[in-house]
């Protein structure tokens, strides 16, 4: 049987251990907000006007609220011509920031191109996002004219 001094000593040690464990848990969590239903936001971070023959690329990202990438495997990208026929279907390449991208040479067809990424996220769910870019006839004619003018100007 424990006497009164031993009982208080044991209780004091137990209290101290509980205090240490609580402090350790507080340090690990570090004041970070814990979100139980953290759903990543997937979006394209590309989209522009292109000239025919230019190097083009489409880039997609999916991030959790803390900024870490949520993409698990290479995304499946598709790019459609303005008439909705298939221009490109390709798996993405990992970018430096956890993004996925595909690169291509812009074809000789003007109009609005639709592109889509179908990605598997780390939670095991697929996510699909679409966007568009424009290949402008006016912009192509302007670029061609400017190149001709540069070629004619004597140095």
Image (cartoon, helix red, strand yellow):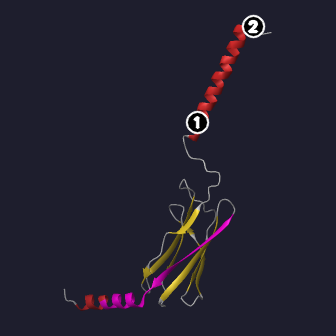
Which residue sits at x=47%, y=75%?
47
Mark 1 secondary-structure assignment: helix
> Is 124 positioned to the left or the right of 101 in the image?
right
For residue 43, above or below residue 1: below
> Badge 2: how crowded within 10 Å, few (<14), some, or many (20+)?
few
Residue found at x 53% / y 56%? 67
Instruction: Give me the disc on residue 104.
Output: none
* Above or below for 88 versus 33: below
Residue 87 point in image, percent of width and height: 57, 85
The answer to whether residue 150 is left or right of residue 129 is left
CA separation in Å, label 2 and label 1: 35 Å
| Quadrant of image for the C terminus | bottom left
Q: Residue furthest left?
A: 155
Residue 104 % position (x, y) = 51, 79
- Residue 134 within the magenta-colored segment of the rendering: yes
- Residue at the (54%, 61%) spot, across then down: 98
Instruction: State left or right for residue 37 relative to residue 3.
Output: left
The answer to which of 146 and 29 lies nearer the viewer is 29
- Between 8 and 20, the residue placed more toward the observer is 8
Q: Which residues are magenta?
A: 125-145
Determine the image quadrant of residue 13: top right
Residue 131, position as x, y percentages in the image: 53, 76
Secondary structure found at label 2:
loop
Residue tagged 2: 3
Residue 143 lies in the magenta stretch: yes
Residue under pointer 1: 26
Q: Quadrant of residue 75?
A: bottom right
Q: Are marks 2 and 1 in contact (CB under 8 Å)?
A: no
Q: Nearer the viewer, residue 45 or 145?
A: 45
Image quarter in which the N terminus is found? top right
Residue placed most toward the observer, 143 or 25? 25
């Amino acid at each position: 049987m424990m006497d009164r001094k031993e009982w208080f000593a044991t209780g004091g040690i137990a209290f101290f251990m509980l205090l240490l464990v609580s402090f350790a848990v507080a340090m690990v969590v570090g004041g970070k907000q814990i979100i139980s239903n953290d759903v990543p936001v997937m979006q394209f971070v590309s989209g522009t006007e292109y000239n025919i023959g230019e190097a083009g690329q489409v880039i997609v990202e999916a991030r959790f609220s803390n900024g870490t990438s949520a993409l698990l495997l290479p995304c499946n990208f598709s790019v459609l011509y303005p008439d909705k026929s298939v221009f490109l279907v390709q798996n993405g390449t990992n970018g430096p920031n956890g993004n996925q991208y595909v690169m291509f040479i812009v074809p000789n067809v003007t109009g609005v191109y639709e592109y889509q990424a179908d990605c598997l996220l780390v939670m095991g769910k697929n996510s699909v996002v679409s966007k568009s870019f424009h290949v402008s006839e006016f912009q192509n004619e302007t670029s061609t004219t400017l190149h001709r003018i540069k070629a004619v100007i004597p140095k």
